[in-house]
Image (cartoon, rainbow, N blue to C red):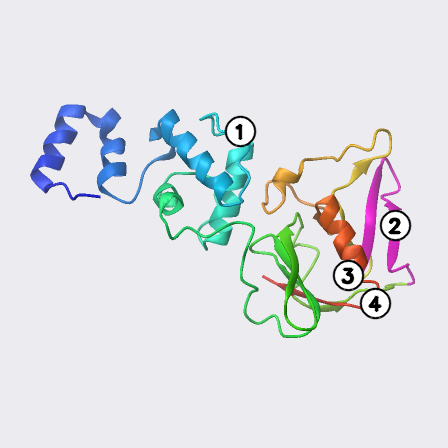
Amino acid sequence: MPRVAKGVHMKALTRLGMGAAALVVAITGTTIPAEALTIAQNKAAQTKLNKLGCYAGPVDGVVGQMTQAATVRFQAANKMTQNGSLGGTTYSRLLASSAKRCDIRAVPAGSGSGRRIVLSQSQNYLWLIDASGKVVRQGGIIDNPTYLSPGSYTTGSKCGRAGRIKRNTDGGSLYLNNFVRFAPCGIGFHQIPTYKSNGAQIHGDWLLGTNMRASHGCIRVQKSMSDTIWNFTVSTTRVVVLR
């Protein structure tokens, strides 16, 4: 990107006025207010988010909740403040060739070694790692850190309750399918809850990996991820929870 001389920059701002100033900053600097993005720029952002596996949904130039959720996942994967806004430095970081994918992330340092599940509360993300250190699968989660402290846990029965329940229930209108318990007394992994009445999930997969929803303490995952966790934890498995 060619540099613009300071005098030319200031004259441009004077001619264009304050309403267009943010767009000039977007061209010559590193920050941009989200409201200053054009529809074409929003589409470019959505296209790049989808290319990076962040799942922004349709490329329509409208920054709705799905695009905001994708932006949060991008910000988490790229170690940025997670506010869901394309403003600030997010837009330029997103379009840069160095932008990191949302769906392929390094296992956090300090998670130990060996066969385990690693859960990052700050990233709203988890990794399944086999005994050789290979990542079997990774993906976004919905959790609630208020109920779960960082530390090391193991899957299995807790507080006299079964460690694995294929079709668990919340005691009300929901099923918690593929429930795998790993922390006292009721905390475990499970598919995003589904309604008993029609089998629909209470929210979409596109919210995973964000704090745009909060669980009641358990770790909600995509259905296919819950199947993988169910099979991965046939034997007792260590779960490492990190902030």
Dots 1 and 4: beta carbons under 8 Å?
A: no
Q: CA distance from mark 2 to mark 4?
A: 15 Å
Is 36 displayed left or right of 168 in the figure?
Answer: left
Q: CA distance from mark 2 to mark 3?
A: 14 Å
Q: Earlier in the sequence, mark 1 or mark 4?
A: 1
- In the image, is residue 59 above or below residue 29? above
Residue 104 locus on image (x, y percent): 55, 54
Region rendered in magenta: 160-183
| Residue type highlighted by circle 1 | Pro
Q: Quadrant of the C terminus?
A: bottom right
Residue 189 locus on image (x, y percent): 76, 53
| Residue type highlighted by circle 3 | Phe
Q: Is residue 183 visible?
A: no
List the residue tagged with mark 4: 235
Would you say residue 229 sits in the magenta stretch? no
Q: Residues within 10 Å of mark 1 (few under 14, many from 20)?
A: few
Q: Earlier in the sequence, mark 2 or mark 1?
A: 1
Secondary structure at numbered mark 1: loop
Residue at 64% x, 57% y: name it: 126
Q: Most extreme residue toward the left, as rendered?
A: 7
Secondary structure at numbered mark 2: strand
| Residue type highlighted by circle 2 | Lys
| Numbered circle sitting on residue 232 | 3
List the residue tagged with mark 1: 58
| Residue type highlighted by circle 4 | Ser
Would you say residue 165 sits in the magenta stretch? yes
| Numbered circle sitting on residue 166 | 2
Dots 2 and 3: beta carbons under 8 Å?
A: no
Residue 125, quarter of the rendered image: bottom right
Q: Earlier in the sequence, mark 3 or mark 1?
A: 1
